[in-house]
């Protein structure tokens, strides 16, 4: 399965927002991650539309998570960015070609469709089991216990 780079960006931004002391402007999020402001703004709009972040206007405005990081899953973010459509869409290829299956024979999903749907279900369950808080805890393990202290200092130096 291939996902857009926006998924990675959005997840990282949610982790950062989970540790911020207040709203973080989109340009600051883009600067921190070294990514395009305009492209990131599009993805922040998707997160906002799905109710994962909210924005405030003004000099001290920016983005904040709408609920605790423990209540936002990686799947929530992926679906906000990529959409809710299944990754696999069966086109009933069995009904094509010189020996097409009848519509009646295709009432039950074929083995290919069953395998793909099962894989997608497992993938979604796996992402549903990881929260933004889990990822933030992993940052402390991967990058060190002072990482978020330094992040907050950097954010306040704007």
Image: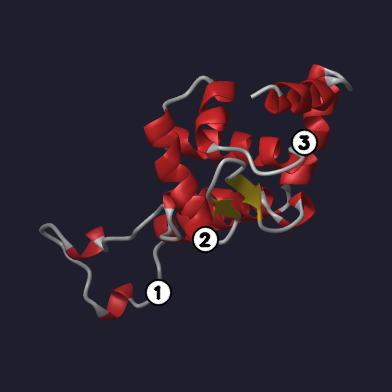
User: CA–CA distance between discs 2 and 1?
Assistant: 33 Å
Farthest-out residue, left: 98
Quadrant for residue 21, please give it: top right
Residue 118 at x, y percent in the picture: 55, 57
- Few, some or many C-alpha atoms within 10 Å of disc 3 (few <14, some 14-19, many ≥20)? many
- Residue lying at 55% horizontally and 40% vertically, measured from the top left: 10
- For label 3, the SS is helix
Colour pattern: secondary structure
Which residue is disc 1 drawn over? Answer: 108
Residue 27 at x, y percent in the picture: 50, 31
Horizontally, is 50 left or right of 140 in the view?
A: left
Residue 7 at x, y percent in the picture: 50, 39
Which numbered dot is residue 136? 3
Q: Nearer the viewer, residue 27 or 98?
A: 27
Which numbered dot is residue 50? 2
For the question of whether residue 115 can be seen, the reply is no
For the question of whether residue 36 can be seen, the reply is yes
Mark found first going from the N terminus, 3 or 2? 2
């Amino acid at each position: 399965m291939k996902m857009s780079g926006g998924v990675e960006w959005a997840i990282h931004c949610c982790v950062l927002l989970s540790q911020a002391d207040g709203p973080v402007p989109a340009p600051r999020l883009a600067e921190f991650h070294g990514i395009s402001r305009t492209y990131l703004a599009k993805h922040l709009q998707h997160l906002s539309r799905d109710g994962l972040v909210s924005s405030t206007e003004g000099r001290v405005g920016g983005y904040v998570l709408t609920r605790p990081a423990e209540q936002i899953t990686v799947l929530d973010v992926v679906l906000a960015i990529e959409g809710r459509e299944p990754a696999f869409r069966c086109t009933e290829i069995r009904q094509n070609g010189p020996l097409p299956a009848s519509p009646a024979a295709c009432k039950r999903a074929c083995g290919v469709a069953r395998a793909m749907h099962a894989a997608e279900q497992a993938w979604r369950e796996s992402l549903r089991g990881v929260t933004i808080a889990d990822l933030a805890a992993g940052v402390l393990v991967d990058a060190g216990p002072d990482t978020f202290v330094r992040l907050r200092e950097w954010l306040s130096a704007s």
